[in-house]
């Protein structure tokens, strides 16, 4: 049976169940959610510890700065990015009606301002956006796992690996920096709660911020490939993730959102003689320090 056939027979089965449970509001609600899930694009969650570069990578994939990065209150909330021709942002506070937020940008990046609300009061944020990549993929940005803040970690875990239901995500991209036992623990929990558990592995691991590996030297991406390969061959990780891919999300985001002035600055940098350029690129401080003499 092909995937499409399986899908239509599953949808048909939901139709039959709907008739059988015609008077039961709760059951009908569950069936509707199931049908929605079958017809929606794949739900891909991006997970990993705080500051692993999750939101930056999401922006790299979308080619726009839509996911807020760093530490604001909204980055502690599970945020869904779905396709729509007209952009909108909806906040779902726990136990209260949903609320629309205005669309505002600062320096090209979308701002999601929760105002008076704290992340604890918010169940999820929905961002509807006309990014072509979202036509075939729902992306879900999650707060950090195993972070210093237990609360934030708990919020991601209960969403991605609930105890009494299948995970809301179909698959995950899991960002790690140094392989830690808690990374393996999370991936094992996801495997056990994923839809169709134990039949398939629905996770890809990413060795993130690859440009910083090996003290950020010029060959850092090559070093990152070697480290990724080592992790990939690690006995436990090999059975929990389809592979380990080294990624510099910031580079991807920068490249996909490059403006003309930035492109010109890069060209100027490339035209400098090698010694001068390398001296400038040692650190951000060195780059902005005025030339002496
Ligand atoms: N050098 C470097 N910095 C990155 C990279 N990806 C993200 N960052 C930086 O790491 C910080 C945290 O990134 P963010 O995407 O908010 O991480 P999150 O907490 O996992 O969502 C930000 O200051 C980013 O600019 C990367 O590939 N390379
Ligand atoms: Mg984030």
Image (cartoon, grey):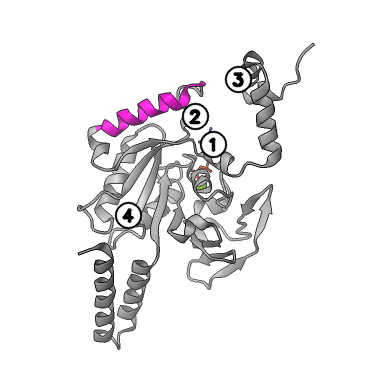
Q: Nearer the viewer, residue 260 or 53?
A: 260
Cβ atoms under marks 1 and 2 closer than 8 Å:
yes
Q: Nearer the viewer, residue 254 or 73?
A: 254
On residue 282, which mark appears?
3
User: Quick one: SS at disc 2?
Assistant: helix
Between the residue at mark 1 and the residue at mark 4, the CA separation in whole angstroms equals: 30 Å
User: Quick one: SS at disc 3?
Assistant: loop
Question: Is 156 placed left or right of 181 in the picture?
Answer: right
Between the residue at mark 2 and the residue at mark 3, the CA separation in whole angstroms equals: 13 Å
Between the residue at mark 2 and the residue at mark 4, the CA separation in whole angstroms equals: 30 Å
Q: Nearer the viewer, residue 9 or 212?
A: 9
**Which residue appears at 26% of the width and 32% of the height?**
234
Q: Give the residues in magenta.
A: 218-234
Cβ atoms under marks 1 and 3 closer than 8 Å:
no
Tag nearer the camera, 1 or 3: 1
Q: Earlier in the sequence, mark 1 or mark 3?
A: 1
Q: Earlier in the sequence, mark 1 or mark 2?
A: 2
Q: Is residue 94 visible?
A: yes
For disc 1, the marked residue is 251
């Amino acid at each position: 049976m092909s995937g499409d056939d399986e899908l239509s027979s599953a949808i048909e089965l939901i139709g039959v169940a709907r008739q059988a449970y015609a008077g039961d509001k709760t059951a009908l609600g569950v069936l509707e959610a199931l049908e929605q899930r079958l017809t929606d694009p794949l739900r891909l969650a991006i997970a990993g510890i705080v500051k692993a570069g999750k939101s930056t990578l999401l922006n790299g994939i979308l080619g726009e700065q839509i996911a807020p990065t760093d530490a604001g209150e909204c980055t502690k909330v599970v945020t869904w990015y779905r396709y729509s021709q007209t952009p909108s942002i909806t906040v779902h506070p726990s136990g209260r009606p949903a609320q629309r937020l205005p669309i505002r940008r600062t320096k090209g990046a979308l701002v999601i301002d929760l105002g008076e609300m704290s992340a604890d009061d918010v169940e999820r944020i929905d961002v509807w956006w006309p990014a072509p990549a979202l036509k075939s993929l729902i992306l879900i940005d999650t707060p950090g796992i195993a972070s210093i803040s237990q609360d934030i970690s708990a919020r991601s875990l209960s969403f991605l690996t609930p105890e009494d239901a299948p995970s809301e995500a179909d698959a995950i991209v899991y960002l790690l920096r140094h392989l830690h036992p808690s990374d393996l623990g999370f991936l094992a929990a996801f495997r056990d709660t994923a839809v169709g558990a134990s039949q398939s592995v629905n996770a890809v691991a990413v060795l993130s911020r690859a440009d910083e590996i090996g003290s950020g030297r010029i060959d850092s991406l090559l070093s990152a490939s070697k480290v990724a390969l080592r992790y990939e061959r690690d006995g436990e990780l090999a059975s929990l993730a389809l592979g380990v891919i080294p990624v510099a999300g910031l580079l991807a985001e920068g490249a996909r959102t490059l403006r003309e002035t930035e492109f010109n600055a890069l060209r100027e940098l490339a035209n400098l003689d090698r010694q001068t350029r390398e001296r400038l690129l040692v650190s951000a401080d060195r780059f902005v320090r005025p030339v002496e003499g």
